[in-house]
Amino acid sequence: MTKGKVFLLLLVALGVGLYVEDSRAAILNFVSPVVQPALNWMTNQELKQIVADLEVHSTSRGELPLGRGEFESWMQSRYRDDRYFTDAWGNPYRLQSQGNTFRVISAGTDGEFGTDDDLYVEGVRGGRR
């Protein structure tokens, strides 16, 4: 059997295993050490892009979309692709501002804000100087 066929067979087996509810948790637990760093990296890349775009927005508009629902509306108008609205775990991003700086935050793997696994990137109103 060629390497390509073995790889395809493993992919099919993984797909079937994830489909069967009894084995899904065990498989996800097994691959977690490999998958979590990739999900963290992907989320950090999105956070960096959102912060950069917010810095440009605050420079051109003089403010951040901080009011109730404004950040969500800004996200929807800025990014046409739904994948930008949430982190790698499906949780919405949050915007916090304090003084001249702000943070875009992901709740991380546990889905709860304010815990040790939260991810965030800080920005500066008006952009970097």
Image (tube, rainbow, N blue to C red):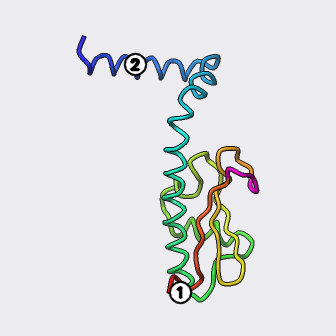
Q: CA distance from mark 2 to mark 1?
A: 50 Å
Q: Main secondary structure of the magenta part?
A: loop
Q: Nearer the viewer, residue 38 or 24?
A: 38
Highlighted range, magenta: 113-117
Say left or right for 35 vs 29.
Answer: left
Q: Residue furthest left?
A: 2
Kindly identify the residue that appears in the image at 60 percent across and 18 percent down: 23
Say left or right for 40 vs 5.
Answer: right
Q: Vertically, is 23 above or below 45?
A: above
Q: Nearer the viewer, residue 113 or 115?
A: 115
Q: Quadrant of residue 66?
A: bottom right
Under tag 1, what secondary structure? helix
Label of residue 10 in the image = 2
Q: Residues within 10 Å of mark 1 (few under 14, many from 20)?
A: some
How far from the left and from the top, in percent, is residue 24?
Answer: 60, 23
Asked whether 57 falls inside the magenta stretch, the response is: no
Label of residue 59 in the image = 1
Kindly identify the residue that appears in the image at 26 percent across and 19 percent down: 3
Kindly identify the residue that appears in the image at 67 percent across and 54 percent down: 118
Q: Nearer the viewer, residue 79 or 17?
A: 17
Q: Residues within 10 Å of mark 2 (few under 14, many from 20)?
A: few
- First in sequence: mark 2 vs mark 1: 2
